[in-house]
Image (spheres, helix red, strand yellow):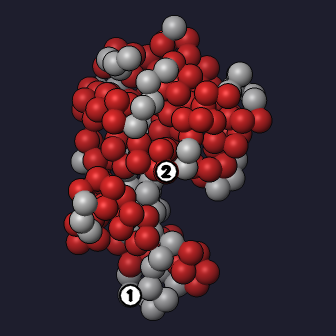
Amino acid sequence: MHITERQLQRIFPNAGPRAGIFVSGIDTTLGTYSITTPLRIAAFLAQVGHESGQLRYVRELGSDAYCAKYDTGRLAERLGNTPEADGDGQLYRGRGLIQVTGRSNYRACSQALFGDTRLLQSPEMLEQPLYAALSAGWFWQRAGLNDLADQVTCAEDAVFEKITRKINGGTHGLADRQALYRRALEVLG
């Protein structure tokens, strides 16, 4: 199943013309990561839509001061960042349509997408539409979310909430994700 610009605009009305920038990358991602059924595509797009503000943001919005939370302490350690206050929290801030965050995730994503560690030297690559979409697909696959998406019966399903927790670590924006899921299912038929 292929996604069109018109479908993306209907699912993400706030994306406006930016939807067209992502069509090719999202379409490639759907095929590459076997996100090929309406349930899988709707669940993927719902999560991507919320995380990216309906395709408007491919870089975490927080200031450098906000991203300092990724620089030192337990969260930084969990993300594979160095324990020193050296700016890697800001360097490896959330990027891509699902907001890949932290040195460890950038390294793993880079290995998966390119077979090397180029994202550690050029993390801003995940702000490019193709790589923003592919990194989201990589994360989706790594988390085993196709299997969960196959089990969702409705937006209010506990399985949909479980997908949200795997993406976000909690249920932040759950109502928005649910609304996007319902809209995506409607648009995809």
Q: Residue furthest top?
A: 189
Name the residue at 56% across, 75% down: 78
Residue 50 picture location, percent across and down:
53, 39
Say what amino acid the circle numbered 1 marks: Asp
- Using the numbered discs, state the Cα–Cα distance from disc 1 to disc 2 in whole angstroms: 29 Å
Query: Is 177 left, or right, of 12 in this rendering?
Result: right
Quarter occupied by the N terminus? top left
Name the residue at 38% across, 81% down: 87
Q: Is residue 148 above or below residue 12?
A: below
Query: Is 36 left, or right, of 22 in this rendering?
Result: right
Residue 129 picture location, percent across and down:
27, 42
Which quarter of the figure has residue 159?
top right
Name the residue at 52% across, 84% down: 72
Is tag 1's residue or tag 2's residue first in the polypeptide sequence? 1
Name the residue at 47% across, 76% down: 80
Mark number for residue 86? 1
What residue is pinned by disc 2? 142
For numbered disc 2, what is the local secondary structure? helix
